[in-house]
Amino acid sequence: MAEIIQRDGVWAFDGGTVRITPGLHRSVALFRQTYGEIAVPLDAVAGVVYEPERKRGRLRLRLREGSDPLLQATGGRLPDAADPYRLTVDLDRSGIAEYVAEEIRQSMLLEQTPKEPASAYLLPGPPVPVSVRSSDGTVSFDGTRVRIDWNDTSDRVKRATGPRIIDVGELVRVEWLPNSGYEDGFLRFVTRETVFSKLPPERDPFALDLWGSTRRDLLTALVATAVTARLPHPSTRADDHADRSGPDGTVTTRPPDPDHHDTLLRRLREIGELHRDGVLTDEEFAATKAAVLRDF
């Protein structure tokens, strides 16, 4: 067992798995503490390096492309402090950090771990259900459906459409950009119907506009990762119409629930008023109306 214990966390390698446990110190990023322990199988590791610096060093783990839904969802945009695959190392522990890195490298050599991109996720991502309250609303995921409940401060366009519920089967991809503190971020759920939508995040009923606490909004990456882990792997090419057609090729649709008729009319009236008042452009009105009708 090769192990290094630091304030930022613990890395332990048993020959087959790198187990990364975040530290409990208040300086450790909220995202890392919330994401919890990560078990990285050796087959998912592309490389490891210890980088000494003047005051302290850094231990970095590099994963194979396509092996981790967290890296797929965040696209390398996680701030360094929130990146679970980086460990800050005190100078008096640099020898231990080098030893841990060398043990991982030797095991990779002995096991002849693959170098090419992975064809399936080798890490599971965060467990579900998961729910995060952001500056724009609360987003939840139970493993099969995404639900967004808007805040009172959300744009009127979003509140007019009501809670957004999206089945995983409707999704094409998830797009995530963190709130940097200088520029807003967003979490967008792209469906087959909205793949060409040009609505900005603050008005897109399929997106959360991240403009508040950067520390809190960063947690939306948990949902982005959990959903990404359950979408087709990027190495595959799914048929966009596979889940929309019956065995005879006909498109199947669900009939609307008559109990929701009054709610549907109310929401259509609300977005109609927003359009007449000039709050919604023609394009935004059409997109919002289509979103409401799809939900019913």
Image (cartoon, rainbow, N blue to C red):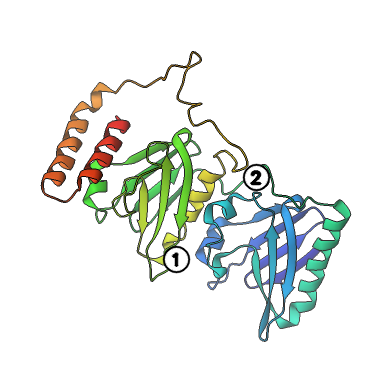
Does the image show residue 1?
Answer: no
> In this picture, is 83 found above or below 257?
below
Q: Is residue 155 left or right of residue 117?
A: left
- How would you rate the neighbour count of disc 2 (Cα within 10 Å): few for under 14, some for 14-19, many for 20 or more? many
Residue 164 falls left or right of residue 24: left
Residue 145 shows in this picture? yes
Q: Residue 200's x, y, as percent? A: 32, 53
Residue 185 % position (x, y): 40, 60
Q: Which residue is mark 2?
A: 121
Residue type indicated by callout 1: Arg
Q: Is residue 23 left or right of residue 223?
A: right
Q: Secondary structure at mark 1?
A: helix
Q: Residue at x 28, y 35 (%)?
A: 290
Give whichever of discs 1 and 2 has the lower sequence position. 2
Read off the residue under disc 1.
215
* Residue occupying the far bottom of the picture: 54
